[in-house]
Amino acid sequence: MRIRDLLNEMLANNASDLHIKVGSPPGIRVHGELLPIEGLPPLTAEQTHVLISELLDDELDKRFEEKRELDFSRQLEGLARFRVNVFHQRGTRAAVLRAIPIEVPLLEDMGFPDVLKQLARRPRGLVLVTGPTGSGKSTTLAAMIDYINRHDHSHILTLEDPIEFIHRDKRCFVNQREIGSDSPNFLAALRSALREDPDIILVGEMRDLETIGLAITAAETGHLVFGTLHTTSAIQTVDRIIDVFPHEQQAQVRTQLSVALQGVISQTLLPKIGGGRACAQEIMVATDAVRACIREGKTPQLLNVLQTGLKNGMQTLESALIKLVTDGKVLPEDAIGMANSPDQVRAAFSRTGRAPVPSGAPQAPPPPVVRPNPTLRPVNIPSAAPPTDIPRSEEETRVDGDGRTAFSPLDDFEQFRRQRKTT
């Protein structure tokens, strides 16, 4: 059993992640469900050690033993790129690998509102893509960066932990810096970025006061800055940024943010009827009304601005979820479960007769839609293949120096099927 065989099986089953640990068969995540690969026995400690060793060269293996965990990316020729986290549990090695498309998805093909293209072409300011872990933030940002790369003549500088999508120069010059190997942390990388003549800066994680403050300053001084936060709504995003600062600085930060902010995209993924996942987005565009609410500390009023800002490209998460249901893409109960205001979504379905599920009342039977239940085909994997090195691109083998794990989701694995058919 070799790691390459398991990764082949992972992609053949349209899976997003591969899990390797002692005492269980290798597992793959298909449409959000973690399932064992059929036909494979539980892994022994020796088998697990050998599988993970195939991912590590001598330097990585040494760092892994020192730090006890490691985050890096690898590209396997003819397969795909993978984000790898190796760690120890119960005294044995374990690993999780996440697939990343080799090609960046086109923004035009993702079904997002046109306002995302408009935000990507802003000359300056701060654009935030937010959501919980596994909500597709990295994929959305990669598509927006690629859109700029195909339409502008600019210098794009990305700061990532680790680098996921590889952006080749198209019309833009693109530099990608990885935290841990190219720079010690986001703050140091962002400080350096301001001396590197960037037009567009992507900050993969805005984790602390200093990084957030410097990102706002960069946006104020003529750069287009993209960033991420783990917030679930536009209003929560504004509050999170303000609240990270001491009380005596918050009035000034409100003023700065009201000037610098261009838009907030808060998104989540939910199961799609027929398989896969659908993306629901709450979108706030920085109109005069939005800027006034931020500046005056009236963030609760932003909800009303969102609800009435359709002509400016705005939408609430609830309206996006309702549309997914009415378009027949997701089940009503899944939409209700993902909403920030479940009662609002439930009431909308009750009015249309789609889902008579009033709060606290017995629910009617769900519509006759069968949720996909992936059937994994048995694996024909040699049990004793000689170990061979995995082809590795030096450019794309990256190591996270501080050992942090910050996985980003993979939204659309149709790309893998298309790519593999053409190779």
Image (cartoon, rainbow, N blue to C red):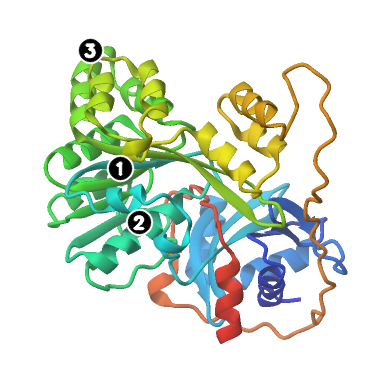
Name the amino acid type tagged 1.
Val
Determine whether label 2 and label 3 are within 8 Å by CB. Answer: no
- Provide residue 282's location: percent of width, then percent of height: 45, 37
Q: Amino acid at mark 3?
A: Glu
Name the residue located 49 percent from the left edge and 64 percent from the top edge. Answer: 73
Query: In front here: 376 or 50?
Result: 376
- Does residue 385 sit above or below 33 in this rendering? below
Q: Quadrant of the N terminus?
A: bottom right
Q: Which mark is residue 248?
A: 3
- Residue at point 64%, 66% (across, down): 52
Name the residue beneath numbered marker 2: 144
Say if 121 sits above or below 173 in the image. above
Residue carrying label 1: 127
- Badge 1 or badge 3: first in the primary sequence: 1
How would you rate the neighbour count of disc 1 (Cα within 10 Å): few for under 14, some for 14-19, many for 20 or more?
many
Q: What residue is rendered at 24% in x and 60% in y?
A: 156
Depth check, front residue: 361 or 408: 361
The residue positioned 34% from the left and 44% from the top of the image is 227
